[in-house]
Image (cartoon, coloured by chain):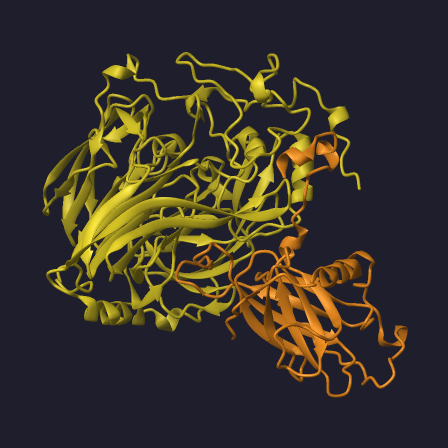
Chain colours: A orange, B yellow
Amino acid sequence: MKRMKPHTGAIGATAVFAIALGSLVSGEARAAGPSDIPAPAGAAPWVDATPRIDACLVTPEVVPLSGTQSAPGSRGSMTLTQPGSPFEITVDDGGFQTFDVEIQVDRLRRRGEAVYVAWAAKPELDEWVQLGTLGEENRLTARLAWNQFLVFVSEEASTDVERWQGPIVLTGLSPSGRLHTMAGHGPFEAMNCQLYF
Amino acid sequence: MRYLAVAATLSAPLWLGLAPAAGQQHAGHMMATDSIGAVWRMPPQPIPMPMMLPGLMGAVPGVTPYLPDPGHDPAMLPEAVFREVVEMADGDTLRLEAGFVRRTIGTRTFTMYGFNGQYPGPLIRVPQGAEIIVLFTNHIDLPTAVHWHGLRLENEFDGVPGVTQDPVAPGESFMYRVYFPDAGLYWYHPHHREDIQQDLGLYGNMLVDAPAADYYGPANGEDFLMLDDLLVDEGGLFPWGREAAIQTLMGRFGNQLLVNGEPRWEATVRRGEVRRLYLTNVANTRTFNLVLVGAEMKLVGADVSKFERESFVSNVVLAPAQRYIVDARFDEPGTYALLNPIQAIDHFNGRFYPQTDTLGIITVLDEPVAEDHGDAFSTLREHADVIEDIDRYRAEFDRPVDHEIELTARVGDLPSDIVAVMAIDTLYFPPVEWTDAMPMMNYLSTSENLTWIMRDTRTGKENGDIDWRFAEGDILKIRIHNQRRSFHPMQHPIHIHGQRFLILARDGVPSDNLAWKDTMVIPVGSTFDILLEASNSGRWMAHCHIAEHLEAGMSMLFTVDPG
C-alpha cells in the first residue's frame, strides 16, 4: 500500500479533465468486445482480467474506467474501500474520507515498452498524485484521502515521471462525481443560481 | 437536461402531515405557534442555498412546535452551574433531579434542562464493581427516564420506557440501582424523547475507576469533554416537534457546537504535560472529527474497555454516544487548538467544502511539568488484561453468522417533490454525513412520515417486531449491513443495551486491535461483523443513537434468558 503525497500546481490539466469528462459523456465508456476495435499498429493483444466485485453484503464503490480516443476499447474499474480504523469511520485530520483504491484494467493494448501510470486529480485540477504503475496483471493499489477526484491512466516511457507526459488512455471519476448539482435544474431552474455559488 | 416540472404542480395546502400555509412570511417562513410562542420557521442554513423547493414555501412540519415551558417566567429560573464531580462508593445514594435551568451560552440566554441544576450533569465517579442508588425525580414538563449508557447493570434499571419501566411523569420519582461492572467511561441521558431532552442538556458522564493504579499509563491531569451541538437562530432555540420528532431524515444537527455546554473549552497546562482526555459525543446526530493541532494524541480506550494496544492517532472520530479515552502531550509552550475539521457537502452545487470549528484552546505555559511522563507517553502499551479477556472469545471469531440486520429507511407521506428530488440527489451518498446538507427537506420529515428500519434479513421482521432470544452466556456473531440502496442512506451509530461486543470485521477486513464496545457507527454501504457476548439477562433494546432515527422507529428488542 502506498501513501500518496499530493503535488500542487496550476498545470495544463484542464485538457486532461476535458478529455476524461468528454470520454465519459460521449459514451466511450461503453463495453466493447475485442472484435469491435481494430488493433493499433504495433499493439499487443487484448489483456482481459477477472473483475473483482464481491457478491455479498459488502458493497464497495466500483466505478468504470473508460478508454479514451488514445486507447479506444480499453476499460477497467476502480474499487474504493475504506481502510480499517479504530474509529470505524476513516477520515484524515482534514476530514477527508480515506480510501483504499484498487485499479484493475481489464482490457488494454500495451504498446511495446510503455508503462502505464495511474493518477488522481482534484476537480479543480490544482492538486494531483501519482497512484502508481500498473503491474503485469494490470492492477495497482494505493491509498488516497480525497472526497472527489478524477482518476486516469497515462502511457509513459518511464515510471520516473512527476507528471503525466504521454497520452491518457483511461479515465474515470470518483463515485462522488455522481453528486448532483441541482443549481439551475428542475425545480430550481427559475432561480438565479449565481446567488448560491 | 430537465428533471422535474414540479413547480407547476405544487400548491399549498400540501401533503398529508403538512400544515397549510397561512400567508407568505419573510424568507418563506411559516408562523405556527404554540402557547409559549414556539414558532415554526425555516431552519438555519449552513451555506447559502434556496430556502425551500419551489412550491413548498411556507410548508411546516405536521406537528406542533415545542419549546421547554417551565410554566412561569423563565427569568426566575436558576442559572445553571458547571458540573460537579460526585465521588461515590459502593452503597452510596445520589439524588438526581431533572429540572429547568437558565443557560447562558455565549451572549444569549435560553431556557433549558439540567440534572441537579448543572451543565453537564454531575460527573459520577465510582470504583469498579460498585453499586449505587440513584433517587431520580422528574421536574421537567415531559415524561422521562434515565438510561445508564454502556453499563451492564440490572435490566429493570436500564431506564427505557416501554421496555424496562414506565416513563417517569412530571413530579414523579424512580429509584435506580446502578451497577458498574467494567472500568471505563460511560454517560447517562434520558431515553424518552431524547431528541428534545438530551438536546436541552440532560446528560452527564460516569467514570468507573479500575482497582489498578496503572490501569492506564501515567498522566499529569485529566479533562472530561462532552461534545454537543445546539440548533439556534435569531429567534432562539429552534423548536422541536411536540407530538413527534422532526428532522428525522438526517437527524438534528446543531449550528452551535458545544464542549461541556460551552461554545469553547479552555484549559491551561504546563510544558511537557500529558493530559488524559475523556471524550463523549452527546449530540443528537453530529459525528465529530477531533484534531488537536500540534499535539500528539495516543488512543487508549473505547466504550467499555481499553484497546488491545495503544496507538498514536492524528484525529479522533466520535459518533453519537461513543466514547474514547485519549492521552495528549504538549511539548512546546503556546496555544493548541481543538478543532473539528470536516468536509461538508453542498448538494445544491454538487461539491464538498471544508468546514472547521474551533472547539477549544489549550494554553501551554512555558513552565516544565513537575513530573515528566514523556517516556511513558512515547511508549505504546500492550494491554495484556484486555488481550487475555478477549482470548476467551477468539475461538468464536470464525463461527457462522447467527443473525443479520439490514439498516434502511421507508418513506411515508413526505412531499412527493422532496422524494423526487432526493431520488436525483441520492445517486451518490458519502459514507458519513457530517452536517445537515439539506435542512429544508430535513425540516419537513417527522417520525410520522419517515421510518428508519432495522430489518432481520432472515425473517423479514422489522424494528419492534424483532425479538431475538438468547441465553446468558451465549456468544453470537451478528452481521449488520447499512444499505446503500435506500432512501437517503446515512451512517448509523448502533447501540446495544446491557451487553458488550467486539467489532470483528468491517467489510470483510478483520479488526487488528480490538476493544469492547457498546456503540458502533456503521458508514453507508458498510457491513460489520460483531461478536456479542450475551452476558446480562433481561429484555434489552438495540437502536440507532441518532435521536431522530430512534424516534423514527430504528430500534429492536432482544431477550437474554438467565443462564
Examine the rendered structure and indicate whether residue B534 appears above or below residue B62: below
Examine the rendered structure and indicate whether residue A2 appears above or below residue A183: below
Between B255 and B448, the residue placed more toward the observer is: B255
Q: Residue at x 64, y 23 (%)?
A: B15
Q: Percent position (x, y) of residue B45?
A: 53, 33
Q: Residue at x 76, y 38 (%)?
A: B3
Between B185 and A197, the residue placed more toward the observer is: A197
In the figure, residue B21 lies in which quadrant?
top right
Q: Percent position (x, y) of residue B184?
A: 24, 55
Q: Percent position (x, y) of residue B106?
A: 32, 31
In the figure, residue B68 lies in which quadrant?
top left
Q: Residue at x 59, y 12 (%)?
A: B22
Examine the rendered structure and indicate whether residue B420 appears above or below residue B472: above
Seen in the image, is B307 located left or right of residue A132? left
Q: Please identify the quadrant where the N terminus of chain B is shown.
A: top right
**Is any atom of residue B119 visible in this view?**
yes
